[in-house]
């Protein structure tokens, strides 16, 4: 079975990593993937490294995003040329773009819902063109159903992580050396795009509250700003200004994007996730698999990652006092951190293994094609002529 994966951006973020994590299971199920994605960038490099065929599909021309009609025309031509048995759009945005195309071609299709956002009626109609919609969490599914997405075609498909790649390891001290920090320095990490919904401003406020009591505490902000929107540019500038205002320039470190997250995690004492909206935080799964205790805001699908208080500390959104309190209590109790890390690892092993996620995705592929008898096979035959 040949499946076309449709990507929007050239970057490697959570959605891209989650889909690529299913590759071993899909290949064992004899499912071949071809990626419709930008021809260059981190995603293209990773696709090449993993041996995934890439058929260039560019949303931008000369720095300007192509019109929706132009993109749909180009996508139609690509799909007719490639002739896959099924189309899988890996984001809500690409699901909206491709829904009417797949319906017009009578091609079996899936769109992944990896965001919790407001939808207008046109977006709902576009997404409901797909044979099936996959939500990364129950919270994500519920949010979309309230806005008019067809519940009969919408299923929950949790992401998974490679439990061999992400596993508890002993810290090597390389990050202390890189940052020229003494061995006694305690590192707390936050991983995610620099963007308002990730809530790094709340982390900085909590850091200011804790710094007088923990002089060896250092905060690592891992991630870059990808959005060129003025509000996001201003948000990034405001983060740096807040660090200066609270006199934290020697304690808060902006590290940019680090590709080997599994190497970073063992260096952390805690991972803090301050998202204002989170469908299903992949970094939370990675930290839990890696044995790093977490403090996270109780939003979206986070409660599905950590359903009991033994697995993580969940705090209210936008509450730097509650965040600082939870961090303080965990810093003062190494036993609780260790017990929490073990409990979270056990839960990830049971519910979020990449092998299981890949098997489930393969089953969705088979079910969707079976729901459209003859269409996937007929289209594949036309594409191979």
Image (cartoon, rainbow, N blue to C red):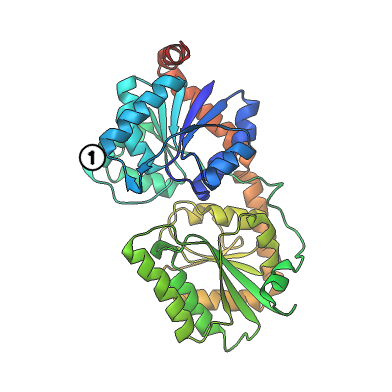
**x and y percentages locating residue 134 in the rendered image:** 43, 37
Residue lying at the far front of the rendered structure: 62
Q: Is residue 294 rendered to the left or right of residue 379?
A: right
Number of numbered tags placed on the structure image: 1
Q: Residue at x 66, y 61 (%)?
A: 265
Q: For residue 343, what is the image quadrant?
A: bottom right
Q: For residue 80, what is the image quadrant?
A: top left
315 versus 2 height, above or below: below
Q: Residue at x 27, y 40 (%)?
A: 67
**x and y percentages locating residue 359 in the rendered image:** 59, 32
Would you call the spot at circle 1 few (<14 residues within 10 Å), some (14-19), or many (20 or more)? few
Q: Is residue 354 rendered to the left or right of residue 57?
A: right
**x and y percentages locating residue 33 in the rendered image:** 54, 29
Q: What residue did someone put label 1 on?
A: 122
Q: Residue at x 61, y 71 (%)?
A: 188
Q: Secondary structure at mark 1?
A: helix
Residue lying at the far left of the rendered structure: 121
Q: Is residue 168 rendered to the left or right of residue 311?
A: right
Residue lying at the far bottom of the rendered structure: 212
Q: Residue at x 34, y 19 (%)?
A: 106
Q: Is residue 130 visible?
A: no
Q: Nearer the viewer, residue 175 or 318?
A: 175
**x and y percentages locating residue 349 in the rendered image:** 66, 47
Q: Is residue 26 visible?
A: yes
Q: Nearer the viewer, residue 185 or 367?
A: 185
């Amino acid at each position: 079975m040949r499946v076309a994966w449709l990507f929007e951006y050239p970057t490697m973020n959570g959605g891209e990593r989650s889909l690529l994590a299913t590759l071993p299971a899909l290949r064992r199920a004899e499912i071949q993937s071809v990626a419709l994605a930008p021809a260059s960038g981190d995603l293209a490099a990773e696709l090449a490294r993993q041996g995934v065929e890439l058929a260039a599909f560019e949303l931008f021309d000369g720095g300007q995003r192509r019109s929706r009609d132009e993109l749909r025309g180009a996508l139609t031509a690509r799909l007719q040329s490639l002739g896959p048995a099924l189309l899988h759009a890996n984001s809500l945005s690409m699901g909206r773009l491709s829904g009417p195309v797949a319906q017009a071609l009578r091609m079996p299709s899936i769109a992944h819902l990896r965001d919790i956002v407001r939808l207008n009626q046109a977006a709902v109609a576009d997404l409901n063109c797909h044979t099936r919609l996959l939500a990364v969490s129950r919270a994500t599914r519920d949010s979309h159903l309230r806005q008019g997405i067809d519940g009969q075609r919408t299923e929950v498909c949790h992401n998974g992580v490679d439990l061999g790649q992400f596993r508890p390891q002993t810290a090597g001290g390389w990050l202390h050396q890189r940052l020229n920090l003494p061995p006694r320095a305690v590192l707390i990490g936050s991983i995610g795009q620099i963007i308002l919904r990730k809530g790094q401003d709340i982390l900085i406020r909590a850091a200011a509250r804790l710094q007088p009591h923990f002089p060896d505490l250092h905060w690592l902000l891992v991630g870059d700003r990808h959005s060129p929107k003025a509000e996001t540019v201003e948000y990034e500038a405001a983060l740096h200004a807040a660090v200066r205002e609270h006199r934290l320039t020697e304690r808060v470190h902006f590290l940019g994007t680090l590709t080997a997250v599994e190497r970073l995690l063992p260096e952390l004492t805690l991972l803090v996730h301050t998202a204002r909206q989170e469908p299903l935080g992949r970094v939370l799964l990675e930290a839990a698999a890696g044995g790093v205790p977490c403090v996270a805001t109780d939003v979206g699908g986070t409660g599905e990652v950590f359903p009991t208080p033994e697995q993580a500390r969940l705090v209210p959104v936008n509450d730097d006092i509650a965040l600082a309190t939870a961090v303080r209590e965990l810093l003062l109790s190494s036993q609780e951190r260790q017990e929490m890390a073990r409990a979270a690892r056990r839960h990830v092993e049971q519910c979020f293994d990449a092998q299981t996620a890949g098997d489930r995705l393969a089953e969705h592929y088979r079910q969707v094609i079976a729901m459209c008898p003859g269409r996937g096979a007929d289209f594949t035959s036309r594409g191979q002529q």
